[in-house]
Image (cartoon, rainbow, N blue to C red):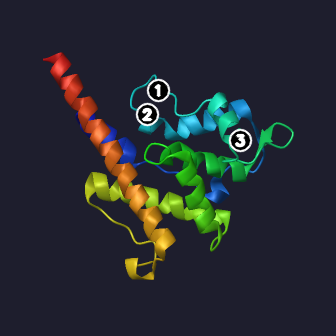
């Protein structure tokens, strides 16, 4: 198996924890950073890139993207928002992310939105990297504008990740020649 196969396997095996899989107990800042970094490290452009830092989280709280911690601890709500922001900030600006979340909150609960986000992201990765699909029980005809926007964002993100992987591999091949 070559390097590109290993990288693709990592992405195809990726699992974004669903709402019920997020820690039940509240986490301190360093635990939040560790959880996000560990889960999302497969999408770092290089091993030195930080997916998230405590400074970033503090800024998201100040910008009201993420609710403030309670007694310096973050719960499922904040963690779910941070997963979404960490991934979407690669293709959207923060205000658009916030507007998208607010738009969806008019029809769905945070848990429904987050779990759907996870499903759509993993589905987009599978389609982009392997041409495979899975059914989440809803056809495109059953999706409303908010879900179509979410699905489109997930495809944009998965395609960005694919392009970055190809460029990185090409650079590595040029350097080793």
Q: Secondary structure at mark 1?
A: loop
* Quadrant in the rendering for residue 142: bottom left
Q: Of callouts 2 and 1, which one flags the residue occurring earlier in the amino acid sequence?
A: 2
| Residue identified by numbered label 1 | 49
**Residue found at x 42% / y 56%:** 154
Residue 140's x, y, as percent? Answer: 39, 77
In front: mark 2 or mark 3? 3
Q: Is residue 70 left or right of residue 31?
A: right
Q: Quadrant of the N terminus?
A: top left
Using the image, tell me which numbered label, if any, was put on residue 61. 3
Give the label on residue 44, or none. 2
Dots 2 and 1: beta carbons under 8 Å?
yes
Q: Compare marks 2 and 3 and give the one earlier in the sequence.
A: 2
Q: State how far apart marks 3 and 1 are (Cα).
A: 22 Å
Q: Is residue 104 visible?
A: yes
Q: Is residue 105 above or below residue 83?
A: below
């Amino acid at each position: 198996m070559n390097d590109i196969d290993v990288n693709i396997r990592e992405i195809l095996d990726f699992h974004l924890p669903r709402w019920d899989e997020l820690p039940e107990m509240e986490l301190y800042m360093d635990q939040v950073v560790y959880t996000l970094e560990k889960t999302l490290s497969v999408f770092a452009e290089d091993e030195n890139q930080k997916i998230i830092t405590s400074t970033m989280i503090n800024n998201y709280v100040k910008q009201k993207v993420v609710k403030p911690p309670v007694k310096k601890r973050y719960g499922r709500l904040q963690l779910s928002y941070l997963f979404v922001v960490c991934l979407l900030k690669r293709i959207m600006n923060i205000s658009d992310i916030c507007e998208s979340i607010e738009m969806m909150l008019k029809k769905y609960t945070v848990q429904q939105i987050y779990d759907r986000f996870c499903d759509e992201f993993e589905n987009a990765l599978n389609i982009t990297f392997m041409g495979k699909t899975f059914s989440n029980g809803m056809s495109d005809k059953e999706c409303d504008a908010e879900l179509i926007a979410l699905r489109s964002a997930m495809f944009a993100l998965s395609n960005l990740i694919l392009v970055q992987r190809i460029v990185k591999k090409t650079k590595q091949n040029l350097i080793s020649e």
